[in-house]
């Protein structure tokens, strides 16, 4: 009898604790996740729980959740684990994983970004923030980047354009090539301050805005550089007056030989005010090149510099040019209007104008008409080409 009573007592105790658990909600089912971070987008939401799991809900048809969702979700759904940071935009989402990698999913029509599964954007990221059209991140070394819609100047890069990939923004430095308020120092620093960074050595190379430069004079205040390789993907290129490396400013004074050699997509080139020389074959074979803007500081145009630019129709030779190399404009078959503003032109190489348009007109300064008619005689142009003031 005692054994039966003890068994009955134990069974009754188990039932009591089970009922108590049901009343308090503490059952054997999944326990509540504690939220440590939260973010709100336009129509979707997300949270990170204390175990590093990412949970999302709301609008998902634009890929905001990165799980190929095709409908709205009213209850939080676990998306991934190992997440440390997050930010939500209008129709896109961004997370930083524990390893510092930045991932994004969703839709940004301003830069044609549309991903319904998570795409890795960068590594070594500490913080990310999404606006309605653009994004920003801070990397572990405290460098700052922006990208996305930029037509209102929201990226801070001075371009006023939409940018697909993150571009470095240096707070406190003047952004070369900008105008208006963008040409003034940004809050938070002194223009040109290098903050102890190492001065790049002579002949060292570096990239700036997707083009490659070489240091020709290593000086903290009066450094110079040459552009040695352009961006072959661009249809329009602008070579800046100055570039920056490690906080130091370098004047761009040269376009090196073959810098844009056979860049067949290039249609327009604008050179900065500090460029004094264009190297041999710098733009040779740029068969789509139609517009060339040479600044007033230019002194030397190298051999075959624009050879074979068959769509180039007009050209202005600036006032300080002293030398035009041999075959400089050879086979520029559409080149019909040439204006030479220089009054100090001393040397024109053989066949400099060979193969230009048969009805081309070369205009020269009035006081240099006779001298230049003699200087330009037999430089490869047809006898029907006129040289006049």
Image (tube, rainbow, N blue to C red):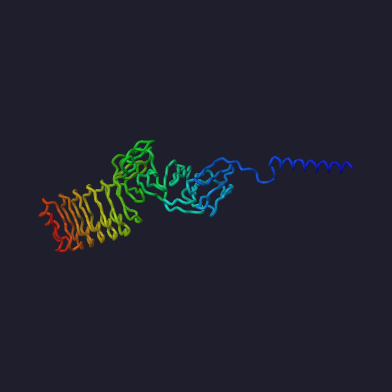
Give x and y (percent) for residue 337.
19, 57
Quarter in which the C terminus is drawn:
bottom left
Quadrant position of the N terminus in the picture? top right
Q: Residue at x 69, y 40 (%)?
A: 24
Q: Residue furthest right?
A: 1
The image quarter containing residue 47 is top right
132 on left or right of 362 = right
Is 153 displayed left or right of 14 in the figure?
Answer: left
Q: From the viewer's perspective, is 52 left or right of 191?
A: right
Left or right: 2 in relation to 358: right
Q: How many marks?
A: 0
Residue 352 appears in which quarter of the rendering? bottom left
Give the residue at x 30% y 39%.
221
**What percent of the width, then of the height, locates residue 379?**
16, 60
Q: Nearer the viewer, residue 323 or 87?
A: 87
The location of residue 387, given as percent across then percent down, is 14, 57
Residue at the image point whose x is 44% and y is 41% from the top: 142
Residue 342: horizontal and vertical position, in percent? 17, 50
Instruction: Pick whichever, 75 or 375, lies toward us.
Output: 75
């Amino acid at each position: 009898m005692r054994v039966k009573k003890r068994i009955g007592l134990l069974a009754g105790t188990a039932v009591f604790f089970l009922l108590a658990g049901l009343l308090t909600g503490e059952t054997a089912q999944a326990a509540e996740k504690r939220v440590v971070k939260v973010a709100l987008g336009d129509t979707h939401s997300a949270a990170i729980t204390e175990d590093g799991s990412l949970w999302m809900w709301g609008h998902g048809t634009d890929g905001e959740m990165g799980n190929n969702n095709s409908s709205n979700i009213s209850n939080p759904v676990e998306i991934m684990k190992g997440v440390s940071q997050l930010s939500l935009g209008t129709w896109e989402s961004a997370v930083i994983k524990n390893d510092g990698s930045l991932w994004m999913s969703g839709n940004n029509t301003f830069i044609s970004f549309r991903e319904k599964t998570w795409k890795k954007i960068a590594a070594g990221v500490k913080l990310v923030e999404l606006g309605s059209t653009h994004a920003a991140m801070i990397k572990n070394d405290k460098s700052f980047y922006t990208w996305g819609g930029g037509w209102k100047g929201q990226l801070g890069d001075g371009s006023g354009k939409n940018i697909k990939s993150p571009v470095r923004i240096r707070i406190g430095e003047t952004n070369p090539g900008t105008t208006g308020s963008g040409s003034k120092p940004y809050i938070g620093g002194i223009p040109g301050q290098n903050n102890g960074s190492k001065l790049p050595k002579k002949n060292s190379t570096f990239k700036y805005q997707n083009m490659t430069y070489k240091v020709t004079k290593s000086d903290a205040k009066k450094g110079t550089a040459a552009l040695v390789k352009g961006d072959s993907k661009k249809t329009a290129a602008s070579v800046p007056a100055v570039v920056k490396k490690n906080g130091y400013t370098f004047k761009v004074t040269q376009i090196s030989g073959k810098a844009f050699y056979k860049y067949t997509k290039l249609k327009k080139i604008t050179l900065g005010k500090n460029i004094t020389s264009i190297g041999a074959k710098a733009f040779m074979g740029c068969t789509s090149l139609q517009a060339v803007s040479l600044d007033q500081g230019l002194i030397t145009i190298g051999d075959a510099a624009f050879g074979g630019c068959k769509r180039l129709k007009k050209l202005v030779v600036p006032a300080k040019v002293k030398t035009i190399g041999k075959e400089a404009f050879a086979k520029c078959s559409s080149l019909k209007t040439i204006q030479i503003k220089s009054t100090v032109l001393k040397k024109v190489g053989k066949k400099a104008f060979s193969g230009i348009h048969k009805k081309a007109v070369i205009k020269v300064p009035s006081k240099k008409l006779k001298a230049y008619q003699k200087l330009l005689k037999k430089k490869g142009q047809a006898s029907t080409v006129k040289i006049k003031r």
